[in-house]
Amino acid sequence: AQSVTQPDIHITVSEGASLELRCNYSYGATPYLFWYVQSPGQGLQLLLKYFSGDTLVQGIKGFEAEFKRSQSSFNLRKPSVHWSDAAEYFCAVGAGVPSFQKLVFGTGTRLLVSP
Amino acid sequence: DVKVTQSSRYLVKRTGEKVFLECVQDMDHENMFWYRQDPGLGLRLIYFSYDVKMKEKGDIPEGYSVSREKKERFSLILESASTNQTSMYLCASRARYRGRLSTDTQYFGPGTRLTVL
């Protein structure tokens, strides 16, 4: 069965420092991979997604992620964190054939930004 | 912009009550989804619908049912609410798959925080 692991429950980063959030997936076929962000009291917003092609994917708000098939990873990065990036981040894998695809989510990583 | 709205942000119900959670999307999306979100468990899929009057069970359908009578509206029903159904409920919608270049993005509503006493 498909699964997603986000090993870090909480991460604290100083404002202006770089960020990397880890995501490992388990899926037999070529994965569809997503990162979503949830700000306090809000729904989920898509940051970026990977389907195929270039393994380095650019997203909104200055985020990027790199797909590494050999490591089954899709880590999220940002070179300089802003206080407004404090939120919960979810990695997800698309499971099943595209027409009937469901998302399997990780348990999330809560990002805290210190001044 | 895609807009997914949910009927209530906060809801408090009593054990045994019948509860309706409503979700409406304005982008003519064929696919709609209901998730519940719990700390440490992430989002788990309850039910989804690929088109009007169509529904499929997700990973945790027990204790829930759904209704999709109109394309834009997807309702989640708790027939007899229990305290273990206290949670955040998120609705999402997505356009039908039209080939590899089509968007597979799910758009989420703001969520309904349900408390069952």
Image (cartoon, rainbow, N blue to C red):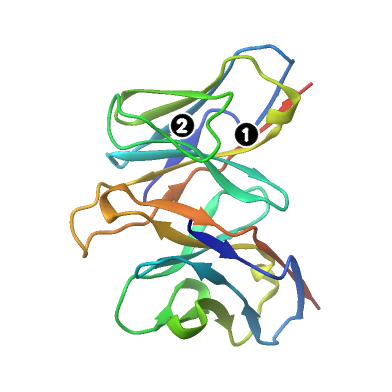
Under mark 2, the amino acid is Cys
Q: Name the quadrant of the C terminus of chain A.
A: bottom right
In the visual, does A63 lie left or right of B24? right
In the visual, does B83 lie left or right of A92? right
> Measured from the top left, where is residue A74 in percent x and y?
51, 76
The numbered mark at residue B9 is 1
Query: What residue do we see at 75% from left, 73% from top?
Result: A11
Chain of the residue on which disc 2 is drawn: B
> Measured from the top left, where is residue B75 in percent x and y?
45, 25
The numbered mark at residue B23 is 2
Under mark 1, the amino acid is Arg
In the visual, does B84 lie left or right of A6? right
Res B88 → quadrant: top right
Chain of the residue on which disc 1 is drawn: B
Mark 1, residues whose alpha carbon is within 10 Å: few (<14), some, or many (≥20)?
some
Given this view, does label 2 or label 1 mark the residue nearer the observer? 2
Mark 2, residues whose alpha carbon is within 10 Å: few (<14), some, or many (≥20)?
many
In this rendering, is residue B73 above or below A57? above
Query: What residue do we see at 75% from left, 25% from top?
Result: B83
- Which residue is at the front of the view, A37 or A69? A69
Q: Secondary structure at mark 1?
A: loop
Disc 2 and disc 1: Cα gap in Å?
11 Å
Residue extending farthest left: B99
Label 2 vs 1, first from the N-terminus: 1
Query: What residue do we see at 79% from left, 21% from top?
Result: B117
Q: Secondary structure at mark 2?
A: strand
Query: What residue do we see at 69% from left, 12% from top?
Result: B16
